Amino acid sequence: MLVASVVAMAAAAAAAIAAKVSTKSGGINLYAGSGATAARAEDGSAAAGQDRAMAMIANAGSQVLLGPTVSASRGSDSVDVEVRGHAVSVVPGLSLPVRATAAGPVERFEPDPGP
């Protein structure tokens, strides 16, 4: 009976943590998406995407994401940004990993070929 109660409490805590991470300051998906937006700009870069995501994480403070890491890549046609970390625990000893990715095409100016 005690084990079942602990498991139920852990499941409820995990759901609460996931909700907190996804809604606090726009959530981890917002960090990845903002990084991808910066990286995919015509004059953007993978470093710009990584910097933007990390700046947003820093702005949100340590109450949302612990040990954050951001990786970004930009090819000739697309960008990918991934944010990883651990959700702040509400249950001692329970540390849940979280991850979000965002991708998109690289923006580029293409002149109108005319008539």
Image (cartoon, rainbow, N blue to C red):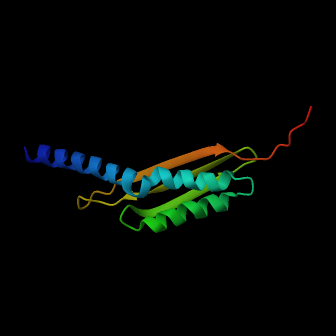
Q: Which residue lies furthest to the left in this view?
A: 1
Task: Give the side of residue 73 with respect to residue 111, left or right.
Answer: left
- Percent position (x, y) of residue 1? 7, 43
User: From this viewpoint, is residue 46 visible?
Assistant: yes
Q: Which residue corresponds to the image point at 65% horizontal and 61% vertical from the top-left?
A: 48
Quadrant position of residue 38 = bottom right
Q: Which residue lies furthest to the top in this view?
A: 115
Front position in the image: 97 or 56: 56
What is the residue that sits farthest to the front in this orientation? 115
Q: Which residue is drawn at 47% across and 62% down?
A: 68
Up/down of 9 relative to 93, above or below: above
Image location (x, y in percent) of residue 17: 31, 53
Query: On the picture, is 92 further left or further right than 81?
Result: left
Query: Residue visible at 70% across and 58% down?
Result: 45
Frontmost residue, 52 versus 82 = 52
Locate the C terminus by quadrant: top right
Q: Where is residue 87 in the image (x, y as percent from the top left)?
A: 36, 57
Which residue shows up at 53% across the image and 64% down it?
Answer: 54
Percent across and percent down for residue 75 are 72, 48
Please indicate, yes or no, whether residue 82 appears anywhere in the rendered image.
no
